[in-house]
């Protein structure tokens, strides 16, 4: 589209991403395809830093696929330290912001929002 005002000069590239149990980042969402990202997902030196959280017992989105994305970030980012990944032993799929923090089976994964906040502070120095 045609330039309208100064807003059009501002980049719409995100400065970071937070992916929680990402789905379909490898072909067919199959852990057997871990190691190769889906063709729609490109990772290069300009890809924003990412915080990734996943439960190892997720029956919907295998954690190995998240690791694939993490490892690609580590291999291509100018500041690879900007990527952080937490794989928690329980939580399944859909734990979100941890609606049930008193449940002992999800207690550990309920730490991910705090871990993400620390990561953002580390990333942006605040």
Image: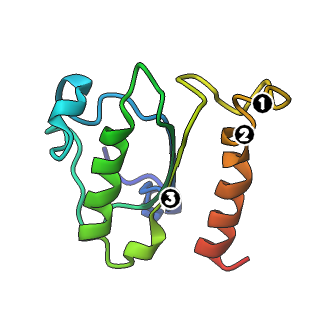
Q: Nearer the viewer, residue 114 or 45?
A: 114
Q: Nearer the viewer, residue 86 or 38?
A: 86
Q: Is residue 67 above or below residue 27?
A: below
Q: Is residue 31 left or right of residue 50?
A: left
Residue depth check, mark 1 versus mark 3: number of the one nearer the observer = 1
- Can you say which quadrant of the picture contains the C terminus? bottom right
Residue that appears at 24% across and 32% down: 31
Q: Residues within 10 Å of mark 2 (few under 14, many from 20)?
A: many
Residue that appears at 24% across and 69% down: 76
Q: Is residue 42 above or below residue 121?
A: above
Q: Is residue 119 left or right of residue 117?
A: left
Please name the residue that numbered disc 1 is placed on.
104
- Can you say which quadrant of the picture contains the N terminus? top left
Q: Residue furthest right?
A: 102
Residue depth check, mark 2 versus mark 1: number of the one nearer the observer = 1
Secondary structure at numbered mark 2 = helix
Alpha carbon of mark 2 to alpha carbon of mark 1: how far? 10 Å
> Which comes before the other along the chain, label 2 or label 3?
3
Alpha carbon of mark 1 to alpha carbon of mark 3: how far? 31 Å
* x and y, in percent, of residue 42 in the image: 21, 50
In the drawing, what numbered circle is on residue 110?
Answer: 2
């Amino acid at each position: 589209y045609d330039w309208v005002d100064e807003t059009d000069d501002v980049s719409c590239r995100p400065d970071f991403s937070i992916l929680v149990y990402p789905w379909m980042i490898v072909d067919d969402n199959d852990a057997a395809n871990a190691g190769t990202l889906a063709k729609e997902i490109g990772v290069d030196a300009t890809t924003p830093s990412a915080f990734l959280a996943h439960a190892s017992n997720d029956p919907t989105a295998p954690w190995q696929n998240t690791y694939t994305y993490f490892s690609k970030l580590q291999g291509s980012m100018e500041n690879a330290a900007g990527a952080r990944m937490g794989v928690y032993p329980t939580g399944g799929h859909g734990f979100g912001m941890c609606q049930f923090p008193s449940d002992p089976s999800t207690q550990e994964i309920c730490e991910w929002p705090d871990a993400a906040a620390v990561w953002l502070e580390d990333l942006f120095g605040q």
